[in-house]
Amino acid sequence: MLKVTLFNMEGIDVGEMELEESIFGINPNESVMHDAVINYLANLRSGTQSSLTRGEVRGGGSKPYKQNKIDRSRAGSIRMPHWRGGGVVFAPKPRDYSYKLNKKVKRLAIKSALSSKVMNKEFIVVDEIKLDNYRTKSIVAMLNALGADKKVLIVTPFIDNFIIKSSNNIPGVETTVADSINVYNVLNCDQLIIAKEAVTRITEMYS
């Protein structure tokens, strides 16, 4: 079994925690992680972009000038794409960019992402991440005590509004819950700070 140091919110070493090797200790599969990130970003796209083709631009119904004997190139409409005010060639239209990944691929991707964090010593387990009120200073103090001074992802076992709202206005800090953790957020952070109970929930979900 893998073992990692367990800290409290003051950054003090309070023991060790065992991690499931089949989830946090596998050889990361970069190809699968790449597929999962591309899928996540594609699913975020709104797909609402839209431009007008030459057939949709208002006007241009009549021929601008006669065909022959005027020493000019032939033109049938003032809404041709190469004319000012004309339509767009192969104009983009609203579409759905989302697609699905196989369940096994998604599971392997999240395991690979978590394992890469443990392997690179960017995985910090805290015995309990908890606040009694909205206080950004408490989160900043925790980050400083744990040496997390870059992009950080804080993972809690359940939705905790005190933690979420106290972290919202700290640049580079994001929060999520164990049930909603995804490959993009894990790989996009420099350090992953996760509550002990959240590790247990993730182990139960992916074991």
Image (tube, grey):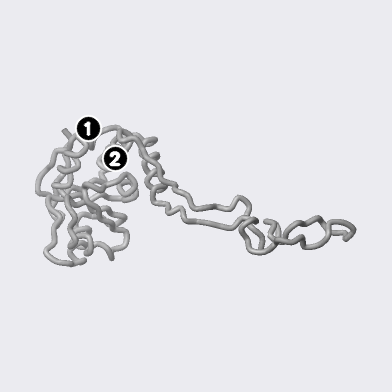
Horizontal and vertical percent position of residue 193: 22, 51
Q: Which residue is the extreme one toward the front? A: 61
Horizontal and vertical percent position of residue 16: 12, 42
Q: Is residue 130 above or below residue 98?
A: below
Q: Nearer the viewer, residue 4 or 80?
A: 80
Horizontal and vertical percent position of residue 150: 31, 56
Q: Residue at x 13, y 47 (%)?
A: 197
- How far apart are the two marked residues, 2 and 1, measured between alpha carbons? 12 Å
Secondary structure beneath disc 2? helix
Q: Which residue is the extreme one toward the right? A: 69
Q: What's the mark number on residue 22?
A: 1
Which amino acid type is marked by label 2?
Answer: Ile
Which amino acid type is marked by label 1?
Answer: Ser
Q: Is residue 199 above or below residue 171?
A: above
Q: Residue at x 9, y 49 (%)?
A: 14
Q: Nearer the viewer, residue 43 or 87?
A: 87
Quarter of the image where the C terminus is located: top left
Which residue in the structure is indicated by mark 2?
110
Displayed quadrant of residue 53: bottom right
Displayed quadrant of residue 55: bottom right
Secondary structure beneath disc 1? helix
Q: Nearer the viewer, residue 156 or 51?
A: 51
Q: Nearer the viewer, residue 47 or 114?
A: 47
Quarter of the image where the N terminus is located: top left
